[in-house]
Image (cartoon, rainbow, N blue to C red):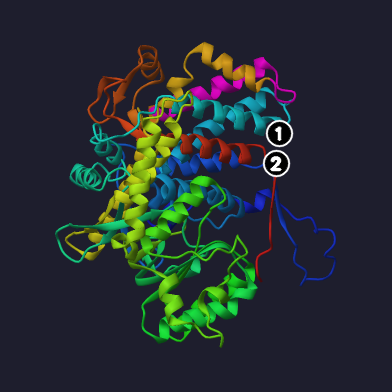
Amino acid sequence: MTQESTSISGNQTEESIDLWKGLRGESAAYKPQFNVYQNLHKFEILDKISEILAKTFGPHGSTTIIEDRQMHHVATKDGYTLLKYLTSSNDLERVILEFVKRTSMRLVRVVGDGSTSAVVVSAEIAKSIKKFMEDHPEIYTGDLMNALSTISEEIQKRVMSYAVQINDDNMDKLTDVMRISTNNNIEMSQLITDVYKKVGKHGSVHVQPGDSYQTGIEYKTGFHMYRGYCDPIFANKKLEDREFCELENARVIMVEGPICGRDIETLSKIMSFVFDNNMGSFVLIANEYSPDALEFARQNVIRSRQKGMPIPICFCEHGIKTREGSNHFSDIATYLGCHVVQYLSLAENLDKAFLDKNGNVDAGLFEYRAGFSKRAVIRDLEAVFFEGAGVNGPDYKILKADLEKQIDKLGKSETKYDFDQQIAALKVRYDRLCACSAVISVGGKSKAEIETNAFLAEDAVLSARSALENGVIPAGNIMAAMVTHDDAVQNEIAEVVGKIGYITTDNAKDLVKMIHDAFIRVFMIVSKLSFEEVVDRLNRKVIFNVRTRKDEPIESTVVLNSARTDKEIIQGALSVVGLISTSNQFIFAPKQY
């Protein structure tokens, strides 16, 4: 597909309003300050984007060939990859396209799947919203936005009630979940499932392009952190459009508190100490950074790259405000062999922790405080540290033994209090400490195939992790329609929505029914069934397997999604549609002349 064929058509001139038309007078050099769009074809634009992506949707979707500006060609069936290449010179089309891209990017980054579904769902719901707005012009846009948000929450709540948690006994369900992410590559899906069986539910899996035809797997110790770098400037590698920071032999400092301008001079000394002594790379983990402290790091990275000698550093954030966050922070420190600088207690600072009386970095203090990771892979939302120095240390063994004692003590308690929640939290901490990690080096026949396979495998890992953390639900792309199919459920949701502003319960019933029908239309696109055929299966509560073209009982279907995938699709689609539908005017900054 060429760039021309993927660009969205439209006419900017007819819709543009020049606010300064009567003010220009004789000044030919005067340019308007803004382009303002009203009475827009916003629904048609969203529908066009959906039409393009729908051609790749589901098992019946086909491959699209894309030619970029450098005349390079990409063949893909991945909706998000296709979406990245869509462009438009029209202001309105571009802004709506960017809204859609952001929603899809979040889905891919968080759950590894659902980008095409979110766009198609958005377009179908938009048709319903347009009809509702035409039928009910008296409804305020603010009330409509709140109504859509409430409907989204109510549907998500009911969808999540079907979630089945993944454990050692049903781990094979991951293979079915990953089929979509790997474009139905059963071999890759099964391989990743087998990897998770070895590393465990709380283990970490990292994907990278290999250098041979065969895909290789390496197992090692590792610890997963649910926060990442605090600025994209630290990214030093790229897989497709996904940037990340990869560091070898990382010396890690952890601070329980903020890093401020007062710390810059000491940080500079510590970083110089690391690099002057060829200690490897440098990672700083704190719960927040002041703008000047972050700018200090940014400028060092930029200048070093300009000189052709990039410094290997990364500043990471970690939330420690909750008890769970504080425990996770402490466990990472134990795994890495860090002795945390306790800023929050006001008893320590970087100067006291690392400098001698002459203001220089004390080697003994540095070795005591700094942890070590053989390899660190850090992204915007997460990080994995491999082969931490603390694994073989006494603190690590003491922590595991202490957690075992706490779990055993609470389990044997005969008091009236219920400790199930505390025991579960302690078991999660213990399992994370005991879990190992895996690195999958994806193979292929060529560099292009290796990178494509690695990209799909990474999506699959994200969807598997989401399933492990949130459970799985049956019948991707139809559950939202299934949970709202009964009139009684629609009435329940309408009762809640009917309390919003000037929306009546009858108005709300119309809106809920229209959105329910939109979800049916989405499944019609992927399944090639008629509206009546989909409704028949909803009435019988059976799942139509699009691949086999057979009905399956809902409790035993192999059509599975991560529960969070469906939740994010519903939330993202209704958010985008609500914003676009209730916006009656778009203003654009002037072009540079």
Q: Amino acid at mark 1?
A: Thr
Magenta region includes residue 50: no
- Camera-side residue: 420 or 264? 420
Task: Indicate which disc, 2 or 1, sits on the residue closer to the N terminus.
Answer: 1
- Mark identifier at residue 179: none
- Camera-side residue: 141 or 193? 193
Tell me what residue is drawn at x 44 percent, y 40 percent: 51
Quadrant (top left/top right/bottom left/bottom right) for the N terminus: bottom left
How far apart, in angstroms, are the residues tagged by discs 2 and 1? Answer: 10 Å
Would residue 513 be found to the left or right of residue 208 on screen?
Answer: right
Tell me what residue is drawn at x 40 percent, y 75 percent: 367
Residue that carries the numbered disc 1 in the rendered image: 141
- Among the 4 quarters of the image, the one containing residue 43: top right
**198 relative to 34, above or below:** above
Q: Report the magenta stretch's main SS.
A: helix
User: Residue 591, image x and y in percent?
Assistant: 65, 65
- Among the 4 quarters of the image, the one containing residue 210: bottom left
Residue neighbourhood size for the residue with mark 1, other residues' Cα within 10 Å, grouped as few (<14), some (14–19), many (≥20)? some
User: Residue 499, image x and y in percent?
Assistant: 70, 21
Q: Amino acid at mark 2?
A: Asn
Q: Which residues are magenta?
A: 499-523
**576 relative to 75, above or below:** above
